[in-house]
Image: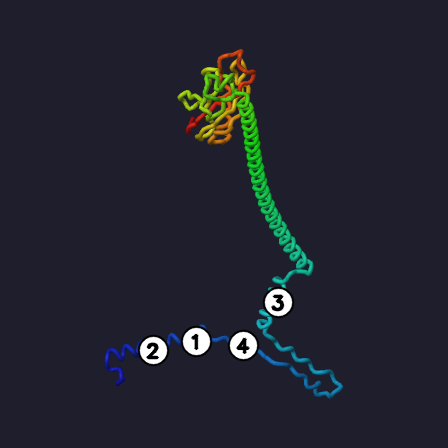
Amino acid sequence: MKYLKTKHEKNSAKITALIMLILLLLLFVVGQNYMDPPEEYGVAINFGGSSGGGGGAPAQAAAPTKTQPEETKPQEEVQQQEAAAAPTSKEDVITQEDEDAVAIKKQQEQAKKENDAIAKAKADQLAKEQAAKAAKAAAEAAEKKRQDEIRKANDALINGISNSENASDSNNNGPGNGPGNGSGSGNSYGPSKFGDGTGKGSGNGVGYGLNGRGKPRFNTIVQDCNESGLVVVQIEVDRSGKVVKAVPGVKGTKNTAACLLEPARKIALTHKWAPDSNAPERQIGFVSINFKLGQ
């Protein structure tokens, strides 16, 4: 061939011929299948009987056309899936709704119980706080009433002592400048009060005043609180020298705290003078205690 002169042209011709041969073989081996005779589609129509006339037997009916079942199959499968997905009956739907309603009702009841418990706890806490406030107010009122009673008792005692001293002055038995604390036939055991110049100190913050009875013995008592100040105690002493009555917080007191009045009263009760048969049956005097912090 005049066109196959070069080596490349010859090789190309060989490759092309080989490809064509392979394609031809593939067409014979795996070519498209076909039916002989071909499948008929459409609707069969009967146009009448045989050639013998209208009274003869009717011509054989044409065979029904063959349909493709593949087209209806997907629709049936879809219907079956929808039927399987749908509830089986009306009772199943009602049962499911009842179960949901019961679950919701239980949740509501549980939430209500929790809210009631929280409300009850808050109410109890509020009641406790109100009770504590009421108890505190009652305690403060009781303490105030007690202080008022002590103040009234001290005022009454001071007024009584003042009246007694005025009566003694009219009989020349009151305090004076003579050896018997009076002029003329004065009484050397006359009542003494704080600030009239008859008080004597012991050097440890405790003073006393009792005319004609000498120096007493006593014990000191530590206070229950950390307070300081002067407390004056009105006392009554019998002939044996024993303090039979002590009233703290009388005139001259600088600190009326309850935690100081009680130890002052106890210190006054520990005082003991020498016996004196000539002394009055109840001689009035005083004890002064000057408390310091921590003492």
Q: Position of residue 289 (x, y in %)?
A: 45, 25
Q: Quadrant of residue 222?
A: top left
Badge 4 amino acid: Met
- SS class, disc 4: loop
Mark 4 touches mark 2? (CB < 8 Å): no
| Residue underneath mark 4 | 35
- As helix, strand or loop, the secondary structure at mark 2 comes to helix
User: Label 1 to label 2, Cα distance in Å?
Assistant: 16 Å
Image mark for residue 17: 2
Q: Nearer the viewer, mark 1 or mark 3?
A: 3
Number of residues whose C-alpha sits closer than 10 Å to that of mark 1, classed few (under 14), some (14–19) or many (20 or more): few
For label 1, the SS is helix
Indicate which disc, 4 or 3, sits on the residue closer to the N terminus.
4
- The residue located at (57%, 29%) in the rendering is 156
Other residues around mark 2 within 10 Å, as few (<14) / some (14–19) / many (≥20): few
Q: Which mark is residue 79?
A: 3
Q: Which residue is mark 1?
A: 27
Three-letter code, disc 2: Ala
Image coordinates of residue 103 in percent, x first then y, are 63, 53
